[in-house]
Image (tube, helix red, strand yellow):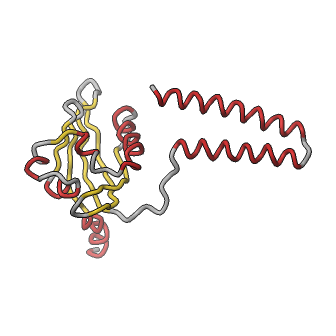
Amino acid sequence: MADSLLRDLEPLNDLLGVWTWNVRTGMVVACQDVCEYIDIPADIGLHGVTMDRFIAAIHPQDRTRLNRCVEDALFHHQPFVAEYRLTSTRHGTCWVRSQGHCFRDEDGNPTHISGYLTKIGEPSALPPSEDQTYAKVIELLMEARTLSEHVREPMLGKLISAVLVEAGFQLANVLKTKER
Protein backbone atom coordinates (compact mmCIF):
# COMPACT_ATOMS: atom_id res chain seq x y z
CA MET A 1 0.00 0.00 0.00
CA ALA A 2 2.75 2.48 0.92
CA ASP A 3 4.67 1.59 -2.28
CA SER A 4 1.58 2.34 -4.35
CA LEU A 5 1.08 5.68 -2.64
CA LEU A 6 4.73 6.65 -3.16
CA ARG A 7 4.53 5.66 -6.82
CA ASP A 8 1.44 7.89 -7.24
CA LEU A 9 3.29 10.80 -5.64
CA GLU A 10 6.47 10.46 -7.75
CA PRO A 11 5.37 13.12 -10.27
CA LEU A 12 5.22 15.61 -7.39
CA ASN A 13 9.00 15.27 -7.05
CA ASP A 14 9.23 17.24 -10.30
CA LEU A 15 6.66 19.86 -9.32
CA LEU A 16 7.97 23.34 -10.06
CA GLY A 17 5.04 25.27 -8.68
CA VAL A 18 1.74 26.96 -9.37
CA TRP A 19 0.54 29.88 -11.47
CA THR A 20 -2.67 31.78 -12.23
CA TRP A 21 -3.47 33.84 -15.32
CA ASN A 22 -6.19 36.46 -14.93
CA VAL A 23 -7.78 36.44 -18.38
CA ARG A 24 -9.41 39.85 -17.91
CA THR A 25 -6.30 41.75 -16.78
CA GLY A 26 -3.76 39.64 -18.65
CA MET A 27 -1.60 39.33 -15.53
CA VAL A 28 0.11 36.10 -14.46
CA VAL A 29 0.91 35.41 -10.81
CA ALA A 30 3.42 32.65 -10.12
CA CYS A 31 5.11 31.12 -7.11
CA GLN A 32 8.80 31.62 -6.37
CA ASP A 33 10.00 28.42 -8.07
CA VAL A 34 8.08 29.10 -11.28
CA CYS A 35 9.48 32.65 -11.28
CA GLU A 36 13.00 31.24 -11.04
CA TYR A 37 12.43 29.18 -14.20
CA ILE A 38 11.12 32.17 -16.17
CA ASP A 39 13.77 34.68 -15.04
CA ILE A 40 11.38 36.87 -13.06
CA PRO A 41 12.26 38.01 -9.55
CA ALA A 42 9.93 36.23 -7.10
CA ASP A 43 8.76 39.45 -5.44
CA ILE A 44 7.57 40.68 -8.85
CA GLY A 45 6.07 37.37 -10.00
CA LEU A 46 4.12 36.96 -6.78
CA HIS A 47 2.35 40.25 -7.54
CA GLY A 48 1.87 39.58 -11.25
CA VAL A 49 3.57 40.10 -14.60
CA THR A 50 2.09 40.55 -18.04
CA MET A 51 1.32 37.50 -20.13
CA ASP A 52 3.86 38.76 -22.69
CA ARG A 53 6.58 38.69 -20.02
CA PHE A 54 5.60 35.14 -19.09
CA ILE A 55 5.52 34.03 -22.75
CA ALA A 56 9.01 35.47 -23.28
CA ALA A 57 10.42 32.56 -21.25
CA ILE A 58 8.77 29.97 -23.52
CA HIS A 59 10.81 28.62 -26.41
CA PRO A 60 9.70 30.38 -29.62
CA GLN A 61 9.04 27.08 -31.43
CA ASP A 62 6.56 26.04 -28.71
CA ARG A 63 4.48 29.22 -28.54
CA THR A 64 2.01 28.42 -31.34
CA ARG A 65 1.23 25.00 -29.89
CA LEU A 66 0.85 26.52 -26.42
CA ASN A 67 -1.50 29.18 -27.79
CA ARG A 68 -3.72 26.42 -29.25
CA CYS A 69 -3.89 24.73 -25.83
CA VAL A 70 -4.89 28.04 -24.22
CA GLU A 71 -7.58 28.59 -26.88
CA ASP A 72 -8.91 25.07 -26.33
CA ALA A 73 -9.27 25.82 -22.60
CA LEU A 74 -10.81 29.25 -23.11
CA PHE A 75 -13.15 28.65 -26.03
CA HIS A 76 -13.74 24.90 -26.17
CA HIS A 77 -13.97 24.16 -22.43
CA GLN A 78 -11.06 21.69 -22.61
CA PRO A 79 -8.73 21.02 -19.69
CA PHE A 80 -5.52 23.02 -20.03
CA VAL A 81 -2.57 20.69 -20.66
CA ALA A 82 0.54 21.77 -22.55
CA GLU A 83 4.12 20.59 -22.87
CA TYR A 84 6.74 23.13 -23.85
CA ARG A 85 10.26 24.34 -23.18
CA LEU A 86 11.11 27.08 -20.71
CA THR A 87 14.36 28.96 -21.11
CA SER A 88 16.09 30.64 -18.20
CA THR A 89 19.56 31.94 -17.48
CA ARG A 90 19.87 29.82 -14.34
CA HIS A 91 18.40 26.52 -15.59
CA GLY A 92 18.93 26.72 -19.34
CA THR A 93 16.22 25.04 -21.38
CA CYS A 94 13.96 22.49 -19.73
CA TRP A 95 10.78 20.73 -20.74
CA VAL A 96 7.70 21.28 -18.59
CA ARG A 97 4.11 20.15 -18.51
CA SER A 98 1.61 22.78 -17.51
CA GLN A 99 -1.79 21.58 -16.36
CA GLY A 100 -4.68 23.68 -15.20
CA HIS A 101 -8.32 24.58 -15.29
CA CYS A 102 -10.19 27.50 -16.82
CA PHE A 103 -12.55 29.13 -14.36
CA ARG A 104 -15.62 31.00 -15.59
CA ASP A 105 -18.07 33.57 -14.27
CA GLU A 106 -21.81 32.91 -13.92
CA ASP A 107 -22.29 33.81 -17.62
CA GLY A 108 -19.72 31.24 -18.71
CA ASN A 109 -17.02 33.78 -19.61
CA PRO A 110 -13.43 32.80 -18.78
CA THR A 111 -12.06 34.66 -15.76
CA HIS A 112 -8.76 32.91 -15.10
CA ILE A 113 -6.76 29.76 -15.68
CA SER A 114 -4.93 28.31 -12.69
CA GLY A 115 -2.51 25.45 -12.85
CA TYR A 116 0.81 23.95 -11.99
CA LEU A 117 4.11 23.17 -13.73
CA THR A 118 6.09 19.95 -13.54
CA LYS A 119 9.46 19.19 -15.09
CA ILE A 120 9.37 16.42 -17.67
CA GLY A 121 11.89 14.79 -19.93
CA GLU A 122 11.99 15.75 -23.57
CA PRO A 123 8.93 14.32 -25.33
CA SER A 124 9.84 11.44 -27.64
CA ALA A 125 8.15 13.08 -30.61
CA LEU A 126 6.36 16.37 -30.87
CA PRO A 127 3.27 16.33 -33.03
CA PRO A 128 3.88 17.91 -36.42
CA SER A 129 2.75 21.47 -36.87
CA GLU A 130 -0.30 22.17 -39.02
CA ASP A 131 1.94 23.57 -41.78
CA GLN A 132 4.15 20.45 -41.69
CA THR A 133 1.07 18.26 -41.99
CA TYR A 134 -0.26 20.17 -45.01
CA ALA A 135 3.15 20.05 -46.67
CA LYS A 136 3.36 16.28 -46.14
CA VAL A 137 -0.14 15.71 -47.58
CA ILE A 138 0.73 17.72 -50.70
CA GLU A 139 4.05 15.88 -51.04
CA LEU A 140 2.33 12.48 -50.83
CA LEU A 141 -0.36 13.48 -53.34
CA MET A 142 2.30 14.67 -55.81
CA GLU A 143 4.18 11.41 -55.34
CA ALA A 144 0.94 9.47 -55.93
CA ARG A 145 0.35 11.41 -59.16
CA THR A 146 3.87 10.58 -60.36
CA LEU A 147 3.37 6.90 -59.49
CA SER A 148 0.06 6.86 -61.38
CA GLU A 149 1.93 8.01 -64.50
CA HIS A 150 4.34 5.07 -64.16
CA VAL A 151 1.50 2.53 -64.06
CA ARG A 152 -0.12 4.22 -67.05
CA GLU A 153 -3.51 4.72 -65.44
CA PRO A 154 -4.70 8.08 -66.83
CA MET A 155 -7.95 8.09 -64.83
CA LEU A 156 -6.06 7.56 -61.58
CA GLY A 157 -3.72 10.43 -62.47
CA LYS A 158 -6.68 12.71 -63.21
CA LEU A 159 -8.36 11.83 -59.90
CA ILE A 160 -5.18 12.53 -57.96
CA SER A 161 -4.69 15.82 -59.83
CA ALA A 162 -8.26 16.83 -58.93
CA VAL A 163 -7.56 16.05 -55.28
CA LEU A 164 -4.35 18.11 -55.49
CA VAL A 165 -6.29 21.08 -56.87
CA GLU A 166 -8.91 20.80 -54.11
CA ALA A 167 -6.16 20.42 -51.49
CA GLY A 168 -4.57 23.61 -52.88
CA PHE A 169 -7.86 25.50 -52.48
CA GLN A 170 -8.30 24.21 -48.93
CA LEU A 171 -4.73 25.10 -48.02
CA ALA A 172 -5.18 28.59 -49.47
CA ASN A 173 -8.30 29.07 -47.30
CA VAL A 174 -6.44 27.92 -44.19
CA LEU A 175 -3.55 30.30 -44.91
CA LYS A 176 -5.96 33.16 -45.60
CA THR A 177 -7.68 32.51 -42.25
CA LYS A 178 -4.32 32.48 -40.43
CA GLU A 179 -3.41 35.89 -41.88
CA ARG A 180 -6.50 37.52 -40.36
Q: Which quarter of the image is occupied by the N terminus?
A: bottom left
148 horizontally vs 27: left or right: right
Name which residue lies at 25% across and 67% down.
13
Q: How many marks?
A: 0
Residue placed most toward the observer, 49 or 113 = 49
Residue 180 position within the rendered picture, expressed as x and y whole percent measured from the top left: 45, 25
Q: Is residue 116 left or right of residue 178?
A: left
Residue 134 percent across, percent down from the top left: 60, 41
Quarter of the image where one finds residue 114: top left
Q: Residue furthest front?
A: 89
- Position of residue 168 measured from the top left corner of the image (x, y, whole percent): 66, 32
Residue 177's spot in the image, x, y percent?
50, 27
Q: At x 35% / y 43%, what residue is drawn? A: 79
Q: Residue furthest left?
A: 43
Is residue 167 depicted above or below 84 in this figure? above
Q: Nearer the viewer, residue 160 or 23?
A: 160
Foreground of the two, 79 or 8 = 79
